[in-house]
Image (tube, grey):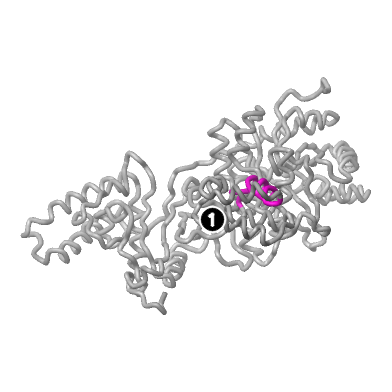
């Protein structure tokens, strides 16, 4: 190994996780463990056209003492649509995080009909503050021009990118065993020297170990609905796209040490500090001259008087029954106001009351929220917690700080009207539903792997049916509880091949969906807290962070679940209404 190799660590700046959906099988926890094992103090995750994993990655990295570099791999299109280029965007600062969040959100909210989310190059102008860009190596517009020996065009394109990203644009170099790689590197280095442009080495990582290449190929085929032996399928990846160690990368680029040095320089330039676990409630309108807590306490007291009157009659004050109710109310108000959750109760109160006023059946409340006398007084719930000895501390406890979470059922059809009302009240830029991630579960992954490997349908069907039908069951547990499964696999080589690969892919994120009951309301634009996503029809706006991550990011989740079919009559619905 050359004596001139850089002494500082190397950091991977282009890496796709399982959340890239159509490629990448890296999962967060094993990634962090491998980085620690290899003494690599930083890494960037740049999933394709999304930021699904950002919060999980950011928090896990900090906990492990590894510096997270947040970013994204985007497809940029020339304004006339004639050229497309991959661009890696890395976040330098809080401003860069907001720039990237808005940009990635618009890939979906402004171009819903596109099968592949792209951004026009001209739309980047003036909107990439706080971002560093890597060129996209030989697959970039610059790379294509260089390989076509169009040096003047490459120089012109480089100048355009440098104008968009002044002092923040790097020519990307990769050695992963792809065609024309060295021709591109020779031309790119020459261009870099001529124009005084920095170069940077990446490995375009898709999996942790070289042995994972076959599993990654299967994952790609599952997504593309192809088989491994399909002669028409593109072979876009190589077995070199694994998480190489620092010494491996140093040996690979020992002739271009500046490319390694610049990878670490970029890490030093990227310093994102997110404020997490700080709930930010939307502003609930209160009468002029009153504070939130004062108004909340007044409404709760008035509501309790109405409840007591309905429970014990107009002369309830003479019956010596009210004291425990007022004592409980005073205690709960103290806790709620101390924890800063008055606004949350008022927001839930408003949309539940609106639902009732608009003839949308609403459930009486279930779960720990039914233990709150304040919720009962505000008619969020309809259960008297004192009558049933329900504990408020199960719902809110100052010693275990967590957001309150009311679980109140809505009529199946009426729920969408409630969401529309909330959106109108707080603004469409502030209200969204929440994303969910579907994974390759035991039964499905066996069928998927068998199809991709070209195995007979009957074999896949038999294997899948031998896995017990049990929510959340894993392949490991299936073998433990169903002896026939093990016996069959032991007796069939094709079944063994299927199961070996299925084990590797089980649990990997496969698709995205929408949370059945979760809605978030932001105090400002949602993109101040989370990137957004929607389906190809342009409908179904959801956050790119899941239900746990949106709360970590500071958004407050409100639960608006549809009532189960068996609950329709309990809500007062007719069959044809729900």
User: Magenta span covers which residues?
Assistant: 494-509
Q: Nearer the viewer, residue 339 or 417?
A: 417
Q: Position of residue 285 (x, y in %)?
A: 37, 59
Q: Secondary structure at mark 1?
A: strand
Which image quadrant is residue 222 in?
Answer: bottom right
Q: Which residue is at the front of the view, 163 or 244?
A: 244
Q: In the image, is residue 108 above or below residue 169?
A: below
Residue 186 screen position, x and y as percent: 90, 39
Q: Residue furthest right?
A: 149
Residue 337 left/right relative to 540: left
> Horizontal placement of 146 versus 397: left or right?
right
Question: Which residue in the protein does label 1 denote?
Answer: 436
Point out the image quarter for the C terminus: bottom left
> Which SS type dominates the magenta stretch?
helix
Q: Residue at x 43, y 47 (%)?
A: 279
Tell me: 342 left or right of 11: left
Image position of 77 with respect to 242: above or below: below
Residue 119 visible? The answer is no
Residue that protrudes farthest toward the bottom in the picture: 576
Residue shown at the point (44%, 52%) measured from the top left: 556
């Amino acid at each position: 190994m050359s004596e001139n190799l850089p002494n500082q660590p190397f950091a991977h700046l282009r890496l796709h996780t399982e959340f890239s959906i159509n490629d990448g099988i890296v999962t967060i926890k094993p990634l962090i463990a491998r980085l620690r094992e290899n003494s690599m103090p930083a890494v960037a995750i740049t999933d394709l056209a999304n930021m699904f994993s950002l919060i999980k990655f950011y928090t896990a990295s900090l906990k492990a003492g590894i510096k997270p570099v947040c970013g994204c791999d985007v497809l940029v299109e020339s304004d006339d649509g004639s050229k497309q280029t991959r661009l890696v965007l890395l976040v330098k600062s809080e401003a860069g995080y907001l720039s990237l969040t808005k940009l990635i959100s618009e890939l979906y909210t402004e171009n819903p009909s596109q099968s592949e989310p792209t951004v026009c190059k001209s739309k980047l102008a003036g909107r990439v503050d706080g971002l560093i860009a890597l060129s996209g190596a030989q697959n970039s517009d610059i790379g294509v021009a260089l390989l076509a020996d169009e040096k003047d065009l490459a120089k012109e394109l480089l100048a355009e990118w440098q104008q968009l990203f002044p002092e923040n644009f790097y020519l990307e170099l990769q050695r992963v065993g792809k065609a024309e790689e060295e021709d591109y590197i020779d031309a790119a280095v020459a261009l870099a020297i001529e124009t005084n442009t920095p170069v940077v080495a990446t490995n375009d990582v898709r999996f942790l170990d070289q042995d994972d290449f076959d599993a990654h190929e299967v994952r790609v085929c599952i997504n593309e609905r192809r088989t491994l032996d399909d002669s028409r399928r593109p072979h876009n990846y190589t077995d070199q796209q694994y998480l190489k160690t620092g010494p491996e990368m140093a040996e690979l680029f020992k002739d271009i040490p500046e490319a390694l040095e610049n990878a670490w320089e970029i890490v030093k330039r990227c310093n994102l500090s997110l404020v997490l676990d700080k709930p930010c409630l939307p502003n609930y309108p209160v009468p002029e001259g009153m504070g939130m807590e004062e108004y909340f306490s007044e409404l709760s007291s008035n509501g309790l008087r109405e409840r007591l009157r309905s429970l014990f009659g107009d002369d309830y004050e003479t019956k010596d029954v009210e004291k425990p109710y007022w004592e409980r109310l005073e205690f709960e108000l103290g806790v709620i106001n101390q924890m800063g959750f008055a606004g949350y109760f008022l927001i839930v109160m408003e949309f539940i009351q609106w639902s009732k006023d608009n003839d949308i059946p609403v459930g009486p409340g279930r779960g720990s929220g039914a233990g709150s006398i304040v919720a009962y007084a505000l008619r969020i719930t309809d259960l008297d917690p004192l009558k049933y000895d329900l504990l408020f501390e199960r719902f809110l406890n100052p010693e275990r700080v967590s957001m309150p979470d009311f679980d109140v059922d809505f009529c199946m059809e009426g729920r969408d009207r409630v969401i529309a009302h909330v959106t109108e009240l707080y603004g469409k830029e502030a209200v969204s539903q929440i994303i969910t991630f579907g994974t390759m579960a035991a039964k499905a992954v066996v069928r998927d792997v068998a199809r991709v490997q070209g195995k007979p349908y009957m074999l896949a069907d038999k294997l899948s049916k031998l896995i017990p039908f049990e929510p959340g069951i894993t392949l490991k547990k299936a073998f433990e509880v169903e002896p026939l499964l093990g016996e069959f696999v032991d007796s069939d080589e094709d079944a063994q091949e299927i199961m070996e690969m299925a084990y590797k892919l089980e649990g990997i994120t496969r698709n995205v969906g929408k949370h059945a009951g979760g809605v978030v309301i932001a105090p400002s634009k949602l993109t101040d807290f989370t990137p957004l996503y929607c389906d190809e029809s342009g409908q179904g706006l959801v956050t790119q962070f899941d239900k746990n991550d949106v709360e970590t990011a500071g958004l407050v989740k409100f639960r608006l679940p549809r009532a189960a079919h068996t609950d329709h009559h309990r809500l007062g619905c007719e069959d044809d209404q729900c």
